[in-house]
Image (tube, rainbow, N blue to C red):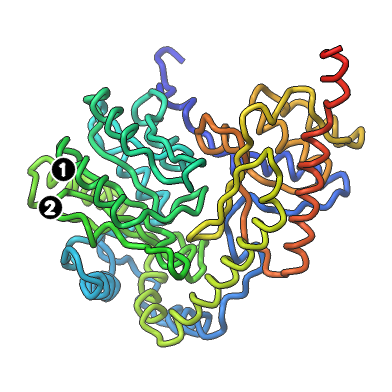
């Protein structure tokens, strides 16, 4: 082309969670079964959507207005319901005009980072969720800036590291919180949230809190939404129905905007998000019509409690099976349906491997790059048919590890996956022992 057409941040757009699927599908084509532990889609994994939710969707789909545009901000009945429920929880109070619907939170994330001034940066957690980190890095044309979640301290954020990086990078305009966290399942204690709000207040920043899993926090986790502690700090909270109902194919998410009256620049930024949405006309109508009917049903929260109990039970079992491996750091999550295992320093080496069939080795071999945790993940995929996501390349992290899901509804199958994973870990971690002894001699 006669002029450059590629955005300078294009190389930062990477979503390993789905990119590994292409390799897994190639292995599956050889006849090998694949156990999908990479993508957080409860429905695809086998969770059954309750009949009463399907009935509500069916009734709404029979209404002509479900086929029409919604207002740009979203349907008033959906926004009114969310604002009313938010206000009943205490903390900051909002109105329906403080909400804006999107075609899923992926759409919201792209819009938010796309609307930022080119120099404005947003710092997020490490490990990072790639939709946030990739969009922010692509917006800036530079690597995403992160603060550390400490695996040696139950995944609590390193607040000293966060503030030091805020001070060292004057272009940072906002802090991201993912609560409950993906990929770790960590739930931010109230005092930690308050400390991050304080950092934002003292350094004149705004906050983004991705709370897509907020209603899937486990009992006793201490889950608090940002609205309960945000005070007068400008902020955006993000929620949706894809994980809750669950209905990931609905592509229905929304943002709640707090304290726009506290800062004229933040107010103008908030208005720019609405203006960007006007160019698209609106978000999907049917899930918005369904939302207050499902969430307002007396069966909804007991249904969520049943699901959350299953995730917590599987998390405890995963710790029982994997927790005694000395090479791993693994903490039970406090929310959502993911777990992350971290390899201790020195546990991974380039000489490690798992036995592969020749045709599978031809598929896996080209994927074995420099990242040691990714090497394990691809060997695991090829040898055991378990598809997980490497921490370093999948979640923009300097830690080595992997994330897997807690979604398998068949408890016996879930236990079998854990046992296979454990055996693969033991075999892989010991696989270069002879080579190391020869070198030592």
Residue 109 relative to residue 383: left or right? left
Residue 331 relative to residue 253: left or right? right
* Number of disc labels: 2
Report the residue marked by disc 1. 201
Q: Secondary structure at mark 2?
A: loop
Residue 26 seen from this side: no
Residue 114 relative to residue 436: left or right? left
Question: Compared to 260, does 48 lie above or below?
Answer: below
The residue shown at (83%, 13%) is 439
Residue 413 seen from this side: yes
- Badge 2 density bin: few <14, some 14–19, many ≥20, Cα 10 Å: some
Quadrant containing the C terminus in the rendered view: top right
The residue shown at (64%, 26%) is 371
Q: Secondary structure at mark 1?
A: helix
Question: Compared to 170, does 395 lie above or below?
Answer: below
- Which image quadrant is residue 364 in? top right
Residue 277 locus on image (x, y percent): 28, 51
Residue 283 locus on image (x, y percent): 35, 60
- Badge 1 density bin: few <14, some 14–19, many ≥20, Cα 10 Å: some
Q: Are marks 2 and 1 in contact (CB under 8 Å)?
A: yes
Residue 365's disc number: none
Q: Earlier in the sequence, mark 2 or mark 1?
A: 1
Residue 187 locus on image (x, y percent): 42, 56
The residue shown at (81%, 47%) is 423
Check the image and name the residue furthest to the right.
358
The residue shown at (60%, 40%) is 342
Report the residue marked by disc 2. 232
- Which image quadrant is residue 149 in? top left
Residue 354 relative to residue 168: left or right? right
Of residue 203 and residue 84, the one placed in the foreground of this image is 203
- Which image quadrant is residue 258 in? bottom left
Question: Compared to 284, does 197 lie above or below?
Answer: above
């Amino acid at each position: 082309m006669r002029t450059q057409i590629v955005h300078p941040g294009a190389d930062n757009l990477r979503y390993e969670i789905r990119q590994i699927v292409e390799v897994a599908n190639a292995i599956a084509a050889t006849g090998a079964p694949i156990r999908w532990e990479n993508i957080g889609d409860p429905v695809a994994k086998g969770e059954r959507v309750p009949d009463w939710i399907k009935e509500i969707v069916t009734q709404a789909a029979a209404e002509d207005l479900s086929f029409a545009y919604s207002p740009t901000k979203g349907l008033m009945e959906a926004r009114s319901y969310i604002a009313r429920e938010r206000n009943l929880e205490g903390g900051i109070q909002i109105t329906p005009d403080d909400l804006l619907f999107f075609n899923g939170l992926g759409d919201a994330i792209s819009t938010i980072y796309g609307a930022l001034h080119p120099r404005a940066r947003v710092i997020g957690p490490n490990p990072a969720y790639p939709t946030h980190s990739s969009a922010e890095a692509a917006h800036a044309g530079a690597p995403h800036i992160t603060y550390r979640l400490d695996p040696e301290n139950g995944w609590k954020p390193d607040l000293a590291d966060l503030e030091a990086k805020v001070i060292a990078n004057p272009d940072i305009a906002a802090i991201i919180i993912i609560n409950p966290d993906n990929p770790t399942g960590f739930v931010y204690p109230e005092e930690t949230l308050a400390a991050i709000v304080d950092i934002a207040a003292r350094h004149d920043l705004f906050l983004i809190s991705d709370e897509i899993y907020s209603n899937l926090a486990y009992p006793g986790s201490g889950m608090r939404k940002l609205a309960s502690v945000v005070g007068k700090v400008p902020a955006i909270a993000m929620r949706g129905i894809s994980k809750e109902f669950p209905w990931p194919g609905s592509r229905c998410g929304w943002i709640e905007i707090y304290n726009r009256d506290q800062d004229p620049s933040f107010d103008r930024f908030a208005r720019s998000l609405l203006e960007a949405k006007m160019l698209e006309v609106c978000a999907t109508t049917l899930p918005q019509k369904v939302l207050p009917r499902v969430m307002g049903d007396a069966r909804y929260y007991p249904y969520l409690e049943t699901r959350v109990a299953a995730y917590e039970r599987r998390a405890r079992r995963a710790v029982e099976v994997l927790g005694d491996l000395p090479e791993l750091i693994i903490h039970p999550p406090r929310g959502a349906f993911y777990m992350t295992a971290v390899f201790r320093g020195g546990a991974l080496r380039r000489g490690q491997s798992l036995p592969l069939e020749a045709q599978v080795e031809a598929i896996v071999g080209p994927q074995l790059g420099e990242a040691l945790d990714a090497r394990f993940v691809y060997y695991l995929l090829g040898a055991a048919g378990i598809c997980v996501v490497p921490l370093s390349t999948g979640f923009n992290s300097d830690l080595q590890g992997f994330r897997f899901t807690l979604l398998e509804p068949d408890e016996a199958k879930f236990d079998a996956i854990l046992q296979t994973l454990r055996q693969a870990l033991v075999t892989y971690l010991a696989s270069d022992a002879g080579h190391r002894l020869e070198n030592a001699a």
